[in-house]
Amino acid sequence: MKIIVVSDSHGSSASLKEIIKRNSNADVVVHCGDSRGEMEEIKMKYPAITYYEVRGNCDWGSSLPNTVTFELDGFRFMATHGHTFGVKYGLQDLAEVAKAEGVDAVFFGHTHIAYNKIHDGVRMINPGSCGGMGATFAVVETKNGQMLTNIAHLKKRGLFG
C-alpha cells in the first residue's frame, strides 16, 4: 500500500497537484492541514484514491476534524496538523497521545520542516510543506507487515516548473 502525506500547501495548488499527479498510483493521500480546500479538485480528478484530511490553524471555518485515526494494511495511523499539540515547541505531547491511541505512526505538519524519526517509540512523520519551490512530502509504503517511510522533494521540471 502506498500512502502520500502532504501538509501546509497554503494555496500553492500547483505543487500539490504535481505531487499527486506524479504519485497517482497511491492508495491513500493524507493532508495534514492548511490546505484551504485545495483537495476538492484533486479528489474529483483521482476518485480511486482514499483521502484523509485534518484542519490546520489557517483553515478558518473548516469543518474538518483536528485529528483523525485510521487503520491500513495492519497499521494504525493518526493524522493531525500539530498546532493543538504544540509541535513547534517539541513532540512529547503528540507522542504521548499517539502512544495512548496505539498508533504505529503519526503524521503532522505546522512546522513546515520535514521530519521522519521514531520519537518515544512512535514513528513521527512531518512531510514538511508541499507549497512553493522547495515542496516536500512523505511517501509511506506498507508491505508484508513492514513500513517504509521517506521524505521526498518535488523537483520542478524546466525553468518554470
Image (cartoon, grey):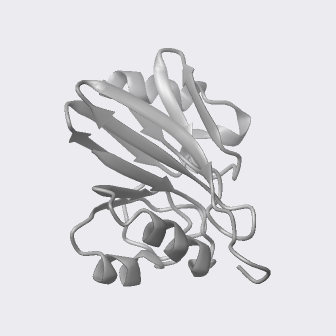
Query: Which image quarter: residue 103?
Result: top left
Q: Residue at x 53, y 45 (%)?
A: 108
In the displayed structure, would residue 74 be above or below residue 3? above
Nearest the camera: 59 or 77?
A: 77
Residue 98: image location, x then y, percent: 41, 29
Q: Residue at x 71, y 46 (%)?
A: 113
In the displayed structure, would residue 22 be above or below residue 79? below
In this view of the protein, can residue 48 be seen by the observer?
Answer: yes
The N terminus, quarter of image: top left
Is residue 25 shown left or right of residue 5? left
The C terminus, quarter of image: bottom right
Residue 147: image location, x then y, percent: 37, 29
Nearest the camera: 51 or 87?
A: 51
Q: Residue at x 55, y 58 (%)?
A: 7
In this view of the protein, can residue 104 be seen by the observer?
Answer: no
Give the total number of marks visible in the rendering. Answer: 0
Is residue 14 shown left or right of residue 42? right
Direction top: furthest residue: 121
Nearest the camera: 109 or 23?
A: 23
Residue 86: image location, x then y, percent: 63, 40
Residue 15: image location, x then y, percent: 60, 73
Q: Residue at x 68, y 30 (%)?
A: 90
Is residue 86 shown left or right of residue 24? right
Direction front: furthest residue: 158
Nearest the camera: 69 or 3?
A: 3
Query: Which image quarter: residue 63?
Result: bottom left
